[in-house]
Image (tube, helix red, strand yellow):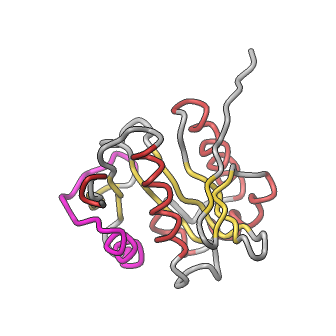
Amino acid sequence: MTVVFQIPELETDRLRLRAPHLDDWPVMCEFFASDRAKFVGGPMTAEQTWRGLATETGHWALRGFGRWALEEKATGKFIGNCGLWEPDGFLEMELGWDLMAGATGKGYATEAGAAARAHAYNALGRTTVISMIAPGNDGSKAVATRLGAAFEKMFSHVTFGDVEIWRHPTPEALK
């Protein structure tokens, strides 16, 4: 059996949203082994991070969309992940982001999030997306707010426990 799928590439002023590469894995291992990953399922071992990378890539094949690797255009450096995620157990399509060490506080998550959301609306025909944010993750709440999302309700996820659902503006509201 051959599985063929194409991961579209997006560009913003400063970022290239591209397919995940195996070369991203060592940087992901550093992130997911750290306490910085506490809001996104970490800390994790290298083996768990490998499975996560495979899952992220496989999501594209199964759903036709997923999360991109973020690359700084100026340096070519892998700085995080951002995109669309809808595994079993999620309420609906989620827009999420993770930034590696040294990439926070620069507006990258907001920039990438806006591009990924536009893809959901323009290429995939979605009319809304959510972000699931762990209570206490003030950085992600600030990104969601900058993207125009607003807290909607709490949701009890089977793996992640209680998370906040942040609703993003519809395509019409963004015009």
Quadrant containing the C terminus in the rendered view:
bottom left
Q: Any magenta on residue 6?
A: no
Kindly tell me whether residue 165 is visible in this rendering: no
Q: Is residue 64 left or right of residue 169?
A: right
- Residue 29 lies, with reference to residue 6, above or below; the image says below
- Residue 58 picture location, percent across and down: 62, 36
Q: Residue furthest right?
A: 23
- Residue 106 lies, with reference to residue 113, above or below; the image says below
Q: Is residue 3 left or right of residue 38?
A: right
Q: Residue furthest front?
A: 175
Is 67 in front, or is 36?
Answer: 67
Identity of the residue drawn at 71% across and 58% down:
46
Q: Which residues are magenta?
A: 137-159
- Residue 107 picture location, percent across and down: 51, 79
Identity of the residue drawn at 60% across and 45% down:
56
Identity of the residue drawn at 41% across and 35% down:
88
- Residue 30 lies, with reference to residue 20, above or below; the image says below
Identity of the residue drawn at 35% across and 75% down:
146
- Residue 37 picture location, percent across and down: 54, 68
Q: Any magenta on residue 158?
A: yes
Quadrant containing the N terminus in the rendered view:
top right
Is 62 in front, or is 106?
Answer: 106
Give the quarter of the image for residue 70.
bottom right
